[in-house]
């Protein structure tokens, strides 16, 4: 712990620098830049530290996003991406889906990775922002996302005010959290959300709006039959010893929370969200030409007071086929 004497000396030095810089534009600019860089470093360190305390795997560096891997090969049974780009991430489809079904001016993508979705939404006229726990991802942001994405962590608190965004998105992110920390994360999503939330979360069991989920690939192969034997009322989450592991014995993709559609629906309800099954049904129809419906376990939620006009679709007769996006490379 820093002593009062040291803190006092540091504060005196800081004030002296400010006084000196007051009459020197160049020095003032340098001090401002350095201060900003130190703040960014501090924020990154705090986000990573809080994530570790929360139990989130610290494994989302370059190799997770395909650095050093054969772009034409596969993942060799290891977690992460053999390649990660705008096509493989299906960002154009996700961006079109959101633009078409949510008439919003602002959006925040939580867990944005390198920001391909942010880039696509900004190209479509939405003031999109993004954040991710991975400093590597933010440092390698897509060109159209640079300056609009930053390192942040749900558990440390997102650096935006209450209700800042018309739409909050979280794609393939929440399953990476320990089950007991999910309520904290959803509360923070609700805090920055000004109306609607869209999420994709690997889920199992009956689905009110689209294809049912499954446990294959989510639990250890020898436990698949056991979980189907529990019947449709089993909600999870699956205990960690039963979760699927990769070739290196690590949890597949760092997935810590594998649960049913109903379990997730209940957790969101506790955070103040109401599930919009009718909107989800429409989204499943939209992605059907791309054969993504079985893979994208999607959810749409709204907060109390959300404007229903926001979810009136744009160009209701348009399809993915017309955009040339009906046969993408399936993302991971």
Image (cartoon, rainbow, N blue to C red):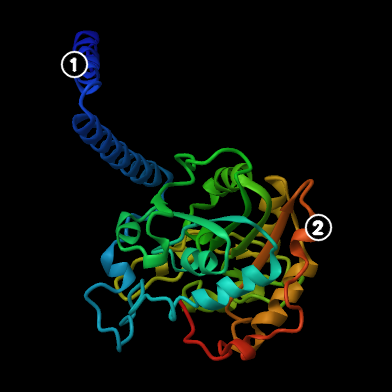
Task: Specify whether 255 is left or right of 324.
Answer: left
Which mark is on residue 140?
none
The answer to whether 328 is drawn above or below residue 151 in the figure is: below
* Residue at 39%, 54% in the rendered image: 147
- 10 Å crowding of disc 1: few (<14), some (14-19), many (20+): few
Task: Specify whether 129 is left or right of 265.
Answer: left
Can see residue 199? Answer: yes
Tell which of 268 and 230 is nearer to you: 268
The answer to whether 66 is drawn above or below residue 184 in the figure is: below
Label 2 residue SS: helix
The answer to whether 38 is drawn above or below residue 249 in the figure is: above
Q: Name the spot of residue 198 as percent of width and height, x first.
A: 63, 61
* Residue at 80%, 69% in the rendered image: 278
* Residue at 56%, 78% in the rendered image: 93
C-alpha gap between disc 2 and disc 1: 55 Å
- Quadrant of the snapshot with the N terminus: top left
Provide the residue designation for mark 2: 308
* Residue at 62%, 61% in the rendered image: 236
Can see residue 109? Answer: no
Tell which of 151 and 261 is nearer to you: 151
- Contact (Cβ within 8 Å) of mark 2 with mark 1: no
Which mark is on residue 13?
1
Label 1 residue SS: helix
Q: Name the spot of residue 249 as percent of width and height, x first.
A: 32, 69
Q: Name the spot of residue 332 as percent of width and height, x first.
A: 45, 76
């Amino acid at each position: 712990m820093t002593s009062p004497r040291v803190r006092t000396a540091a504060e005196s030095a800081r004030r002296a620098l400010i006084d000196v810089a007051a009459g020197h534009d160049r020095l003032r600019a340098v001090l401002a830049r350095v201060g900003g860089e130190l703040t960014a470093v501090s924020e990154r360190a705090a986000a990573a530290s809080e994530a570790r305390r929360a139990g989130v795997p610290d494994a989302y560096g370059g190799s997770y996003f395909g650095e050093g891997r054969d772009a034409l090969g596969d993942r060799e049974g290891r977690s992460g991406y053999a390649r990660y780009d705008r096509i493989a991430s299906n960002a154009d489809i996700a961006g079109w889906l959101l633009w078409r079904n949510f008439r919003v001016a602002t959006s925040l993508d939580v867990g944005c990775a390198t920001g391909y979705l942010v880039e696509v939404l900004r190209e479509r006229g939405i003031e999109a922002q993004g954040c991710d726990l991975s400093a590597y991802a933010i440092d390698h942001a897509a060109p159209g996302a640079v300056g609009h994405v930053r390192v942040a962590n749900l558990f440390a608190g997102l650096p935006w005010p209450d209700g800042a965004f018309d739409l909050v998105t979280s794609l393939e992110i929440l399953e990476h959290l320990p089950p007991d920390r999910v309520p904290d994360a959803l509360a923070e999503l609700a805090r920055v959300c000004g109306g609607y939330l869209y999420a994709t979360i690997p889920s199992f069991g009956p689905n009110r709006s689209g294809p049912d989920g499954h446990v294959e690939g989510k639990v250890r192969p020898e436990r698949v039959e056991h979980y189907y034997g529990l019947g449709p009322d089993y909600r999870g989450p699956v205990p960690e010893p039963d979760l699927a592991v990769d070739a290196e014995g690590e949890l597949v993709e760092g997935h810590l929370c594998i649960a049913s559609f109903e379990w997730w629906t209940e957790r969101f309800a506790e955070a103040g969200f109401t599930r919009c099954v009718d909107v989800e049904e429409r989204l499943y129809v939209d992605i059907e030409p791309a054969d993504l419906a079985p893979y994208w376990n999607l959810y749409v939620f709204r907060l109390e007071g959300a404007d229903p006009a926001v979810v009136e679709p744009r160009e209701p007769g348009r399809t993915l086929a017309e955009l040339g996006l009906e046969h993408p490379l399936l993302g991971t």
